[in-house]
Amino acid sequence: MKVNSKRLILYVLGLFCLSFGVSLSIQAGLGVSPVSSLAYAISLTNGLSVGVTTILANVLFIVIQILLNKRIEFQESAVQLIVALLFGFFMDATLFLVQLFPAPETILARFLFLVASLFVVAAGLLGYFTAKLPLMPYDALTYAISEKFKLKFSKAKITSDLINVGVAGAVCMIFIQSLGSIGIGTIVAAYFIGKILGWMIPHCQKPMQQWVFKMEKVENPISAGIGRKLAGAQTKKRPL
């Protein structure tokens, strides 16, 4: 399918919202979502910006994909790297914007930041998947795990999240003697982002599709299937 400007705009906006939601969760200080836990853990242990460590973590996800698939798809890997660079830039930019807000000092304010982050991340995922453009390395890795070990996508998603959180927690414990990027917010995000996304899909995706694919017939888009998988549904379709 030809890539039109509206798809690209929706895709970029989705990535921006996703990064903005992650930045809100960082500012909340209650733990970040599993997807960003490793990048934030690395940032806490060596002083690099979250954007830089996000790029490094995504490069690692690309390398693991290559090892699992036992082949190198240069074009696919190059596209994923470009997406990772863009997302890393957005992470630093949105974290800068979020830090302009008054810092949440009470537990109530921190939970409000956390709740806001859940909805912003879910909205970002909805736009990102609806555009039906290349997956980010973490999502592509989840699919590779699903294919390699013959797991349903929902189970592969849980597996990749658990591994990512486990490695992030270990990194923080070794270098800063605390859980660092892992907290109650991580658990809340792991459970509720999929639920919120599942609620958004039937209410918000159709208008997006009508705007983006105005001249195209959209029927059972695969991107919606990914969203439903992330929301807990089980399907065997490839999320591409």
Image (cartoon, helix red, strand yellow):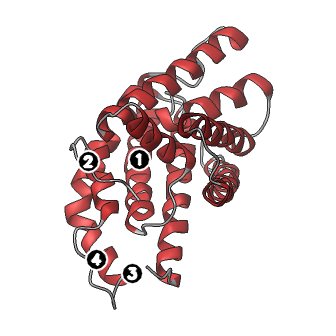
Relative vertical location of residue 214 with respect to residue 194 in this rendering, above or below: below
Left or right? Give the position of 101 relative to 187. right
Cα distance between the residues tagged 4 and 2: 26 Å
What kind of residue is marked 4? Pro
Residue highlighted by disc 3: 212
**Residue that appears at 56% across and 60% down:** 16
Q: Earlier in the sequence, mark 3 or mark 1?
A: 1
> Residue 236 has which mark?
2
| Quadrant of the drawing holding the N terminus | bottom left
Q: Earlier in the sequence, mark 2 or mark 3?
A: 3
Crowding at dot 3, Cα within 10 Å, few <14 / some 14-19 / many 20+, comes out as: many
Across and down, in percent, residue 158 comes to: 36, 30
Across and down, in percent, residue 136 comes to: 54, 52
Left or right? Give the position of 230 relative to 96. left
**In front: label 2 or label 3:** 2
Q: Earlier in the sequence, mark 2 or mark 1?
A: 1
- Nearer to me, 220 or 72: 72
**In front: label 4 or label 2:** 2
**Residue that appears at 44% across and 30% down:** 161
Relative vertical location of residue 183 with respect to residue 19 in this rendering, above or below: above
> Residue 207 has which mark?
4
Cα distance between the residues tagged 4 and 1: 22 Å
Across and down, in percent, residue 2 comes to: 48, 82
